[in-house]
Amino acid sequence: MLIEFMWFKFHNCPKGPVVRITITKEWIMLTKGKAATFTVTAYNAENESVALPADLAATASNGTASFDATTGKGSVTPDTVGDETITATGAGVTGTLSDTVQADQTVAVLKVAFD
């Protein structure tokens, strides 16, 4: 008697719906008027990263945010010093990241020469 078994491995199958969205900052200090990047990641109930929802959008409470849903990368440029909250929403799930916007710390150096 011959018994054969077929084993299948499925790739790129849906891993379940999005249940959590995280936003990870890629800056040390968030500065007024300067762009800073962030990354958005979506997770399923098994805490596995999954594809970002097609309707995912990102907003900023104190500035301008832009976001690319294909790469998960975004950028925020704060308008004023104070609190900033970035919100990413898709598939009915919302993730937030809050930070404090600092004043521009640029230091000007004036070099004076005397003859």
Image (tube, grey):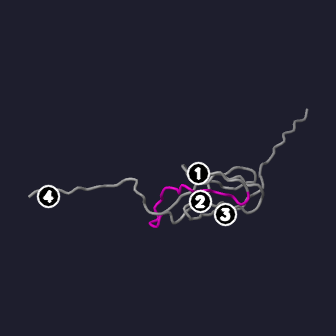
From the image, state whether disc 3 or disc 4 is nearer to you. Answer: 4
Q: In front: 2, or 35?
A: 2
- Give the Cα distance between marks 4 and 1: 51 Å
**Residue nearer the viewer, 115 or 59:** 59
The reply, left or right, for residue 43 in relation to residue 81 is: left
Pointer 4 residue: 3
Q: Amino acid at mark 1?
A: Lys
Check disc 2 and report the residue beneath it. 23
Query: Distance from label 3 to label 4 (Cα)?
Result: 60 Å
- Quadrant in which the C terminus is drawn: top right
Marks 1 and 2, the one that precedes in the sequence:
2
- Residue located at (43% from left, 60% from top): 15
Q: In this orientation, which residue lies closer to the viewer: 111 or 43?
A: 43
**Could you give the CA–CA distance between mark 1 and mark 2, rounded to whole angstroms?**
10 Å
In the picture, residue 81 is in which quadrant?
bottom right
Q: Tell me if 76 is positioned left or right of 54 in this view.
A: right
**Of label 4 and label 1, which has the lower sequence position?**
4
Q: Which residues are magenta?
A: 44-62
Classify mark 1: residues with Cα within 10 Å, few (<14), some (14-19) or many (20+). some
Residue furthest to the left in view is 1
Q: Which residue is mark 3?
A: 98
Mark sitting earlier along the chain (1/3): 1
**Which of pointers 4 and 2 lies earlier in the amino acid sequence?**
4
| Real-space CA distance between mark 4 and mark 2, rounded to the nearest whole angstrom | 51 Å
Q: Nearer the viewer, mark 4 or mark 1?
A: 4
Mark 3 neighbour density, 10 Å: few (under 14) some (14–19) many (20 or more): some
- Assign a secondary structure to mark 1: strand
Residue 73: image tag: 1
The amino acid type of the residue labelled 2 equals Ile
Query: Which SS class for mark 3?
Result: strand
